Each structure stands twice: as structure tokens, then as C-alpha cells.
Amino acid sequence: MKLAIMQPTFMPWSGYFALMNAVDHFVFLDDVQFDKRSWQQRNKIKTDVGEVFLTLPVRTKGRFIQNINMVELSEFTKIAHKHLKTIEFAYSKSKYFKTVFPLIEHEYTMGYSKLSDLNISLISRFRELIGISVQTSRSSELACDGVKEKKLLAICKELGASEYLSPFGSSNYLVDIDEWHSADISVKYFALNPQPYKQLYGDFISHLSVLDLLMNNLEKSKEYISCQQAIICQDA
């Protein structure tokens, strides 16, 4: 069984879903330390004036060390209205706006109080739109201790993975390959070469939220995600 593990980021880019599409089981790593001002709470979309960040305000005062699944949204009703207006302004003329926007609007009115709940729900709705069928879990629901590599290995063991697919940029965390081999788990690295697709507002901009891909190319989104020239590197 192929498994991947990633933090639940906010409206992640298409590469996140390419990794999800390449495995049998995907784990949201939600019980590790929250990193303020990271992709966990913000992402980019494209407007007629270029890239614009959508950022979710969260409660951090007096909470300097908290896991992702404990982070609470702050003034979400106000920011939800602002986000929806920004998204509508940016994509109202896109081909699939009338299909995708109501989904975003629905999620923003569900009354989420936790950042991870909103992020995971949005990711789940996006993957359904794309057509990705994969089993998912939250690491906070598993009895897996440890930090960094040891935690990842514990999750793989708990779920019975035979292959762990790691984002290429995280390869520096996996330093004890022998320990993975001892557990009969193969480690491979996943890298992407993003390809241009049709966008509004001029030249192509890479690494935007997947929202941009869905608004402009919903029907071809899975084909696009599947053919981004994924590079699978054998473990050392």
C-alpha cells in the first residue's frame, strides 16, 4: 500500500493533489506544531493585478506552541465575506466559476472554528471535484508518537504501508533509510515539474492555489494533475 503524509494546508496548489493522486492512503499530519504565516493558513490566487494572498486569521496570542489541529480561526465570519468577494472578483469570468464558487461559498458558511477542519474539508471537496479517489486519515486520530522521521515511520507502520511517497523537498528528514528498510517499507521521493495551463489575466503563473486550476480547467484538472511529469526517485 502506497502512503503519503502532508500537513493540511489552506487551498493547496495542484502539486499537493498530484501527490494525493499517486497513493492509496493519504494522511493529514495535523498533530505537529503550527507555523504561523505558513501555507497552513494562506495561499495565492490570480487576479487582474497579479497574485493576491488569501490569509486566514487565527488565534495565537498566548498560544506560541500549539499543534495544527488545535489552532482556532479568528473573526472568520468577517474574513469569509472578504475572501468570497475577492474570489468572485478574480474568477467570475472563468469557465467553471458557477460550478466551483458555490462549493467554496458553502464551506465558508459551515461555521468551522478550527483551522485544520476547514482546510481538510476544502481539500476533500477539491479532490472530489478533480476525481481523486483515495483513503484519508488524520494523524491526530492515530496512536503514533515521535517527531519528524520517527513519527512518519510510526504512521506508516500503524497503517501497514509498504511504500512511503515523500515530497522531494522533505528528503532531508529521511536520513535513516536502514530503519525504513527494517520495517519493510520502501521510501520514494515525489517531485513535480508544473506545466502551464489556461489562466485568466495574461502570462501563466505557477504554484497558485488549486482553486485557479479548477476555476479555469475543471474538466481537465485530473488529466493535468496526472501528467505533470512526476519524478519518482528510488530510495538510497
Image (tube, grey):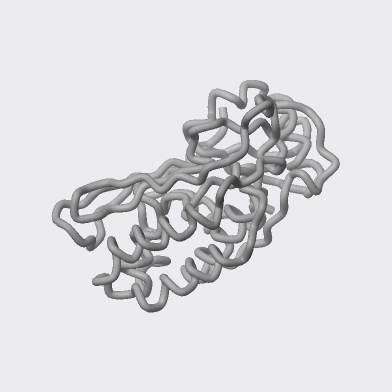
131 displayed left or right of 45: right
Image vertical order of residue 107 relative to residue 82, above or below: below
Q: Number of labelled discs?
A: 0
Residue 69 pos. (x, y %): 70, 43
Judge from the rendering whether residue 215 lies leftward or rightward of residue 167; answer left or right: left
From the viewer's perspective, tell me whether residue 176 is left or right of residue 140: left
Name the spot of residue 116 as percent of width and height, x first. 64, 49
Residue 118 in picture, x, y percent from top left: 60, 55
User: Horizontally, is 185 left or right of 121 in the view?
Assistant: right
Q: Which residue sits furthest left?
A: 202
Closest to the observer, 142 or 149:
142
- The residue closer to the viewer here, 50 or 12, is 50
Q: Is residue 147 above or below residue 127?
A: above
Residue at the extreme bottom? 98
- Residue located at (62% from left, 66% from top): 110
Q: Split into 4 quadrants, where in the image is the C terminus?
A: top right
Question: Which residue appears at 28% of the width and 61% of the height?
Answer: 90
Quarter residue 231 falls in: top left
Residue 214 rendering spot, x and y as whole percentages: 38, 66
Q: Residue furthest right?
A: 143
Q: Choose between 101 and 176: the one closer to the eye.
A: 101
Residue at (80% x, 48% y) in the render: 141
Question: Residue 99 sits in which quadrant?
Answer: bottom left
In terms of depth relative to the viewer, which is nearer, 34 or 226? Answer: 34
